[in-house]
Image (cartoon, grey):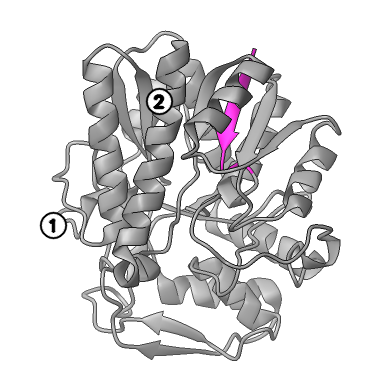
């Protein structure tokens, strides 16, 4: 049997594919490569096995997903495939609803047709919106404040309904802010176009690929005025998906779980520590707040420890050191290794958060 990883060529998906393989699972990646590359798949194969299965296509295509399930005898699914920029979702809300909910519904339909019950869903802390109380627990009020967050919240509602009807056992993993890279430096974050994740932008400025980093908001009620986030090493996050699949062997229905460190850091704290890691100043400027952003949010991860037996282990410096190692060895991402022809950018494929 095997686990299907949709969006498995992307940032979090590729690291999760490696973690699953290392734990002895047979992995099948499905990705439309709209925000990833075939070179990323090759890099995952280099860290795992040369014959790791890869299916190129859209997770919204029920027939394609079903064929992959049948061919590789899939019995569990980890679903990442989605678009994931908060700012872009504000500009293109319809595209986000079509892609993120469409891919989820496609996967669910293919699973239902074959009686597959176990699913791990890539959700997000954006479902909490702008929390009044931090840290947030899974019982904190829900109220997304941007279209990306709404797609995750609506996705959870769909999954809750299907699980309540007895057709699914699912872990809803609410990520906080993934950064870092595999310690080998072989895989890391390689977004198409302008990065949407802070750490990726920060490192591109450090490499001289961009002039400066814009820090959105300097008037939040925090120690230095910049927003507070709970940064989480992508390898810790990948390992949580393995723990979630294991938990689903005995846990039924739908379970929402926060994945974070339980510690908040401001954006400017992250910038200062990154400057120590790279060994030189990183140009940045504080600008106006960005629509759809929360001012402060970090997790209470105690339920993840209780339900999954999982705790984040890597600290912020390690996250930045691993991210920088990847960027130094791949200043243009996977661009030099790409063998597939250039693609026109389009929404879909593998997310980075």
Dividing the picture into quarters, in which one does residue 281 lie?
A: bottom right
Give x and y (percent) for residue 158. Answer: 26, 32
Report the residue marked by disc 1.
Answer: 132
Label 1 vs label 2, nearer the camera: 2
Q: Is residue 311 magenta?
A: no
Image position, residue 104 (x, y; %) = 40, 37
Q: Nearer the viewer, residue 343 or 318?
A: 343
Residue 335 lies left or right of residue 61; in this view the side is: right
| Residue ID at (60%, 48%) | 32
Residue at image point 66% right, 29% down? 28
Left or right? Give the position of 316 relative to 165. Answer: right
- Distance between the alpha carbons at the discs numbered 1 and 2: 37 Å
Decide which of 23, 61 is in the foreground and name it. Answer: 61
Q: Residue sitting at 25 percent across and 52 percent down?
A: 150
Q: Residue at x 60, y 52 (%)?
A: 11
Q: In terms of image quadrants, where is residue 7?
A: top right
Q: Position of residue 350 (x, y in %)?
A: 55, 50
Compare residues 80 and 348 and report the one nearer the observer. Answer: 348
Q: Name the residue that disc number 2 marks.
A: 109
Where is residue 324? Give x, y as percent: 69, 66
Helix, strand or loop at mark 2: helix
- Pick out the residue farthest to the front: 63
Secondary structure mostly taken by the magenta-highlighted segment of the chain = strand
* Residue span colored magenta: 1-8
């Amino acid at each position: 049997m095997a686990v299907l990883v949709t969006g498995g060529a992307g940032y979090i998906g590729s690291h999760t594919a490696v973690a699953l393989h290392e734990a002895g699972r047979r992995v099948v990646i499905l990705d439309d490569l709209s925000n990833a590359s075939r070179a990323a798949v090759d890099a995952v194969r280099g860290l795992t096995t040369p014959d790791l299965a890869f299916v190129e296509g859209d997770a919204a295509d029920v027939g394609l997903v079903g064929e992959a399930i049948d061919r590789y005898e899939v019995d569990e699914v980890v679903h990442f495939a989605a678009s994931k920029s908060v700012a872009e979702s504000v500009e293109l809300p319809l595209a986000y609803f079509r892609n993120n909910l469409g891919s989820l519904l496609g996967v669910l339909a293919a699973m239902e047709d074959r009686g597959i019950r176990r699913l791990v869903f890539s959700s997000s802390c954006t479902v909490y919106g702008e929390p009044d109380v931090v840290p947030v627990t899974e019982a904190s009020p829900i109220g997304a404040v941007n279209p990306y967050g709404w797609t995750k919240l609506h996705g959870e509602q769909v999954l809750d309904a299907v699980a309540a009807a007895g057709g699914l056992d699912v872990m809803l993993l609410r990520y906080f802010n993934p950064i870092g890279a595999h310690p080998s430096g072989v895989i890391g974050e390689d977004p198409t176009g302008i990065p949407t994740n802070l750490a990726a932008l920060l490192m591109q400025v450090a490499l001289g690929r961009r002039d400066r980093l814009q820090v959105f908001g300097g008037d939040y009620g925090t120690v230095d005025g910049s927003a507070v986030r709970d940064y989480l090493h992508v390898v810790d996050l990948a390992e949580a998906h393995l723990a979630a699949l294991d938990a689903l062997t005995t846990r039924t229905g739908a379970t929402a779980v926060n994945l974070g460190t339980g510690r908040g850091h401001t954006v400017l704290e992250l910038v200062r520590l990154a400057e120590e890691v790279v060994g030189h100043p990183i140009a940045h400027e504080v600008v106006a707040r960005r629509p759809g952003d929360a001012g402060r949010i970090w997790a209470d991860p105690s339920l993840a420890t209780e339900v999954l037996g999982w705790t984040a282990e890597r600290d912020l410096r390690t996250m930045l050191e691993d991210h920088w190692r990847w960027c130094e060895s791949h200043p243009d991402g996977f661009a030099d290794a790409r063998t597939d022809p250039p693609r026109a950018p389009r929404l879909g494929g593998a997310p980075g958060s």
